[in-house]
Image (cartoon, rainbow, N blue to C red):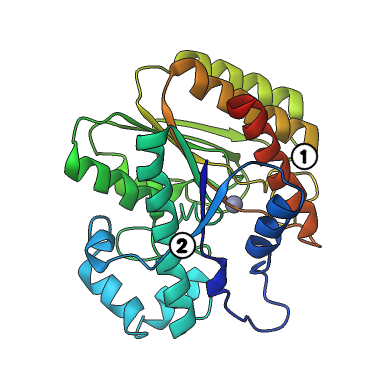
């Protein structure tokens, strides 16, 4: 399996910043050191501007790339806009594009970044400058408009950017499971939105996931946003899933992919425990489960 990464573009953040920049590299080192999965780890280059244009306004892209983003738009993203940050955002984008096109050829691939589901056409928010699932979907459809793409977003925050960009596109079906009381406070309608109340635990969540997956068929590629911020320890998530619950969540998703005979590209999504190692542990479990389902 090929796993793409972009953590070499790590960007120093001000002390006490809420974004866990270090988790990406930590996770990659853990996956390699503990031989969690027999994968080839490939560093991603930065993405092309033409690709960004598939899902974003020219003016917005220009403002980000030239570091001239209006203050209000910059504040919504919540990350300092610096040359390093722009490179990182573009590398993270390319990492997911590589995973997507590799998945179409080889069945399964992933990016150790991304899942930037809060970015809209004309502005980013929630730590997301550009929307990788939207760009990947549009790029595939620019080659094959009939490719049936399923987006499954299990990050605790609703995928408002995925929906605002893609929910009128043909041959895309978007599912979001999220904490109803979590950011974004104004959700954007997906094809299926499941908003859970505060402190929802494993049983209810997993039961719902089983129900939804049973009803879904006919897609060719899954883009899976595997955020682990629904973990009970997470600082930003309102749900109370356990490690075992998340593990079972991933197993259900991977078994679904296998039984449907479809391809899958996976992105990391959110994980904001303090210390961040607790989130990294959950991501490691995701890769262990992936290995168990697909490669054993
Ligand atoms: Zn999230």
Q: Which one is closest to the eye, mark 2 or mark 1?
A: 2
> Can residue 13 be seen in this snapshot?
yes
Q: Position of residue 230 (x, y in %)?
A: 69, 43
Q: Using the image, determine if residue 133 lies above or below residue 246.
A: below
For this view, does 176 lie left or right of residue 218?
Answer: right
Q: Which mark is residue 92?
A: 2
Q: Nearer the viewer, residue 257 or 154?
A: 257
Q: Which of 26 and 128 is in front in this view?
A: 26
Q: Which of marks 2 and 1 is nearer the N terminus?
A: 2
- Residue at the image position 48 percent from the left and 41 percent from the top: 109
The local secondary structure at tag 1 comes to loop
Up-down relation of residue 264 to residue 85 (above or below): above
x and y percent of residue 215 in the render?
A: 46, 14
Quadrant of the image containing the C terminus:
top right
Residue 60 x/y as whole percent: 29, 71
Q: Where does residue 118 sit, x and y in percent of width and height?
A: 46, 55
Q: Quadrant of residue 107?
A: top left
Residue 131: quarter of image: bottom left
**Number of numbered labels in the structure image:** 2
Q: Nearest the camera: 259 or 224?
A: 259
Q: Which disc number belongs to residue 62?
A: none
Q: How far is the residue under mark 2 from the one under mark 1?
A: 29 Å
Q: Which residue corresponds to the image point at 65% horizontal and 64% vertical from the top-left? A: 25
Q: Which of 247 and 290 is in front in this view?
A: 290
Disc number for residue 240: 1
* Relative to 174, 39 lies left or right: right
Local secondary structure at mark 2: helix
Residue 294 occupies which quadrant of the picture?
top right
Q: Can residue 234 be seen in this view?
A: no
The image shows residue 295, relative to residue 273, as above or below, that is above
């Amino acid at each position: 399996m090929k796993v793409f990464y972009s953590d070499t573009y790590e960007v120093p953040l001000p002390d006490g910043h809420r974004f866990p920049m270090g988790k990406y590299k930590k996770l990659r080192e853990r996956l390699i050191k503990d031989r969690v999965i027999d994968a080839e780890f490939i560093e991603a280059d930065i993405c092309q501007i033409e690709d960004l244009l598939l899902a974003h306004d020219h003016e917005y892209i220009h403002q980000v790339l030239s570091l001239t983003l209006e203050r209000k738009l910059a504040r919504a993203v919540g990350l300092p806009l610096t040359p390093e940050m722009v490179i990182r955002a573009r590398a993270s984008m390319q990492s997911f594009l590589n995973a997507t096109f590799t998945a179409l050829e080889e069945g399964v691939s992933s990016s150790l970044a991304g899942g930037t589901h809060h970015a809209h056409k004309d502005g980013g928010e929630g730590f997301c400058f550009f929307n990788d699932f939207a760009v990947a979907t549009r790029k595939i459809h620019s080659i094959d408009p009939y490719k049936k793409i399923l987006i499954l977003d299990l990050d605790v925050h609703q995928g408002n950017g995925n929906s605002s960009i893609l929910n009128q596109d043909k041959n895309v079906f978007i599912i979001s499971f999220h904490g109803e009381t979590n950011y974004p406070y104004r959700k954007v309608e997906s094809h299926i939105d499941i908003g859970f109340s505060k402190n929802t635990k494993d049983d209810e969540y997993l039961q719902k996931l089983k129900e939804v997956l049973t009803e879904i068929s006919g897609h060719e590629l899954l883009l899976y946003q595997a955020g682990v911020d629904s973990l009970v320890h997470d600082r930003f998530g309102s749900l109370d899933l356990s490690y075992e619950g998340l593990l079972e969540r991933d197993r259900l998703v991977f078994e679904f992919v296998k039984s449907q005979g479809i391809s899958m590209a996976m992105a990391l999504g959110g994980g904001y425990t303090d210390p961040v190692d607790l989130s990294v542990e959950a991501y490691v479990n995701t890769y262990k489960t992936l290995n168990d389902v697909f490669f054993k």
